[in-house]
């Protein structure tokens, strides 16, 4: 290998030491060459040592094979052909038709001394080669050739597989993306672009937290992704995704892969809404059935009470009226008796009997009024006179003071006086009962408006607890140890029969105000 120019022979008589040294050197050189040749021939990769032929302008036009190993012969299909000293154009006649200019490329390596590595396909052999060319001395080049045909076939198959995979992934109507073990995006399908409005080029090879800022949702997602990679088991959860449309809900499946995870996210917003609607509808139906059932039971119970009240009302009232009459006569007879302790005790007993008789009468009246259909009889009413009459019959205890105020001039009122009297009486008695132990003040205030008037009955009693506020107008509900729970229910029914409305304001320990708004004349 190298320059073949013959050297001028000079005859020198060697000394004995010189001859010995020469023999030793030649022996060492011979052994070194033998080892080199053995290593050279046993190389797995092909090796060729070539001299480049240049034209007069120093352009490479051919190259000569100075040495090649067995692997090079096998890879290039040269076999036992005579190669050494041959030009490449003699061995490969179709080289000039190759799209890759081997002579020019290798000639530049020999001329410039720069190492060059490249991969090229050889059509005549149907193989791919990886070539590493370098310049051991000017005008020469050596190249190591490796057969990479199988790798190229695998890469091509992988590219085709990846192409099909991407085509399939992009055809999926659900979101699909992939992350590597460092949580960098390696795939992002078109549905992801649609939902997030972030293109694939702005996502790929970026970290999850670069694309989506750290937050409650993203931290939860990363925790689940890490669990999938650690346990090598699929994960499933339902969550909103960190997108521009945070109102959407996704069913998310996380699958571990060879180097990371794949994530499928299915939009289930409409399904969740539908489920929620169905659940609400079902719950509402159940509530309605329960309410209707309770109402039906209450109606049946009230109907039974009404029928009973209607049947026994007259039977109770007849002896009741007799009792009240006898009590009145007894009081008259007591008035003419001389004063004394006995008279006082009898008078107190009669007063107690009278109170209880009036209470019985109220219960019967409430039962009948609630059970029957109310038809008010409209007539002109002096409201102030009605209020005064109600106050005079209250028989309030000494520790309760009763006041009233009516705005004047007060417009003419056309309503049912018996209804108004019952409303005021029931509410006033409720207020007095709320102040029996502590005492206080009962106030009736009346104010006029354009088409209605407001009547407010206030007490300074115990007030109404929050947990019973929504029940106080229901029949058979009472917080009193003595009572049937029809008083306020009858009041509400009477107010509505007159075309009005009733509400209340209360504070525990401070008192209650019932507010009634009635029209001056009920519409017919």
Image (cartoon, grey):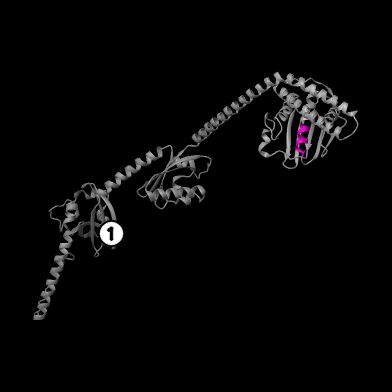
Note whether 328 is above or below 221 in the view shown.
above
Viewer can see residue 449: no
Viewer can see residue 511: yes
Q: Is residue 256 one of those drawn in magenta?
A: no
Q: How many marks?
A: 1
Residue 145 drawn at (x, y percent): 23, 55
Q: Which residue is mark 1?
A: 108
Residue 224 drawn at (x, y percent): 44, 48
Location of the N terminus (image quadrant): bottom left
Along the line of sight, which residue is nearer the eye, 67 or 111?
67
Q: Main secondary structure of the magenta part?
A: helix
Residue 86 drawn at (x, y percent): 16, 56
Residue at 60% across, 26% down: 292
Left-right relation of 29 to 261: left
Along the line of sight, which residue is nearer the eye, 368 or 176?
368
Along the line of sight, which residue is nearer the eye, 34 or 102?
34
Along the line of sight, which residue is nearer the eye, 113 or 490?
490
SS at mark 1 in the image? helix
Note whether 448 is above or below 104 in the view shown.
above
Where, by quadrant of the figure, is residue 68 drawn?
bottom left
Where, by quadrant of the figure, is residue 25 drawn?
bottom left
Left-right relation of 246 to 481: left
Q: Is residue 428 one of those drawn in magenta?
A: yes
Instruction: Tell me which segment is drawn in magenta.
Output: 427-436
Left-right relation of 482 to 446: left
Residue 207 drawn at (x, y percent): 44, 52
Location of the C terminus (image quadrant): top right
Q: Badge 1: how crowded within 10 Å, few (<14), some, or many (20+)?
A: many
């Amino acid at each position: 290998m190298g320059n073949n120019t013959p050297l001028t022979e000079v005859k020198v008589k060697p000394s004995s030491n010189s001859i010995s040294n020469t023999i030793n050197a030649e022996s060492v050189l011979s052994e070194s060459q033998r080892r080199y040749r053995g290593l050279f021939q046993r190389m797995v990769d092909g090796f060729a040592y070539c001299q480049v032929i240049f034209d007069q302008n120093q352009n490479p036009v051919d190259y000569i094979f100075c040495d090649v190993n067995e692997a090079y012969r096998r890879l290039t299909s040269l076999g036992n052909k005579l190669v050494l000293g041959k030009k490449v154009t003699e061995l490969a006649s179709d080289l000039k038709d190759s799209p890759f200019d081997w002579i020019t490329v290798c000639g530049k390596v020999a001329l410039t001394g720069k190492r060059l590595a490249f991969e090229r396909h050889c059509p005549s052999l149907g193989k791919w080669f990886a070539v590493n060319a370098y310049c051991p001395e000017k005008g020469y080049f050596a190249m190591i050739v490796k057969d990479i045909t199988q790798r190229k076939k695998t890469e091509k198959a992988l590219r085709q597989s990846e192409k099909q995979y991407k085509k399939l992934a992009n055809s999926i109507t659900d979101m699909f993306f992939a992350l590597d073990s460092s949580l960098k995006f390696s795939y992002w399908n078109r549905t992801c672009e649609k939902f997030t409005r972030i293109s694939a080029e702005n996502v790929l090879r970026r970290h999850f937290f670069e694309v989506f800022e750290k937050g409650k949702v993203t931290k939860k997602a990363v925790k689940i992704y890490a669990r999938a990679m650690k346990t090598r088991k699929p994960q499933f959860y339902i969550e909103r995704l960190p997108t521009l449309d945070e109102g959407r809900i996704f069913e998310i499946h996380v699958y571990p892969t060879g180097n990371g995870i794949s994530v499928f996210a299915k939009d289930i917003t409409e399904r969740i809404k539908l489920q929620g609607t169905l659940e609400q509808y079902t719950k509402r139906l159940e509530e309605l059935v329960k309410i209707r059932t309770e109402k039906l039971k209450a109606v049946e119970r009230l109907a039974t009470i009404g029928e009973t009240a209607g049947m026994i009302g007259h039977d109770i009232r007849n002896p009741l009226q007799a009792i009240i009459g006898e009590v009145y006569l007894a009081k008259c007879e007591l008035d003419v008796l001389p004063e004394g302790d006995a008279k006082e005790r009898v008078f107190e007993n009669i007063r107690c009997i009278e109170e209880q008789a009036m209470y019985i009468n109220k219960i019967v009246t409430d039962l009948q009024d609630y059970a029957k259909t109310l038809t008010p009889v409209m007539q002109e009413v002096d409201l102030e006179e009605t209020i005064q009459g109600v106050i005079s019959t209250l028989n309030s205890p000494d520790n309760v003071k009763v006041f009233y105020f009516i705005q004047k001039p007060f417009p003419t009122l056309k309503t049912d006086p018996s209804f108004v009297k019952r409303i005021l009486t029931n509410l006033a008695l409720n207020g007095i009962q709320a102040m029996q132990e502590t005492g206080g003040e009962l106030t009736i205030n009346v104010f006029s408006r354009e088409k209605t008037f407001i009547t407010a009955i206030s007490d300074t009693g115990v007030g109404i607890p929050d947990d019973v506020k929504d029940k106080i107008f229901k029949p058979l509900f009472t917080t009193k140890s003595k009572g049937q729970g029809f008083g306020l229910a009858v009041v509400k029914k009477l107010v509505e029969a007159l075309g009005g409305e009733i509400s209340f304001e209360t504070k525990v320990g401070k008192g209650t105000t019932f507010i009634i708004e009635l029209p001056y004349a009920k519409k017919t």
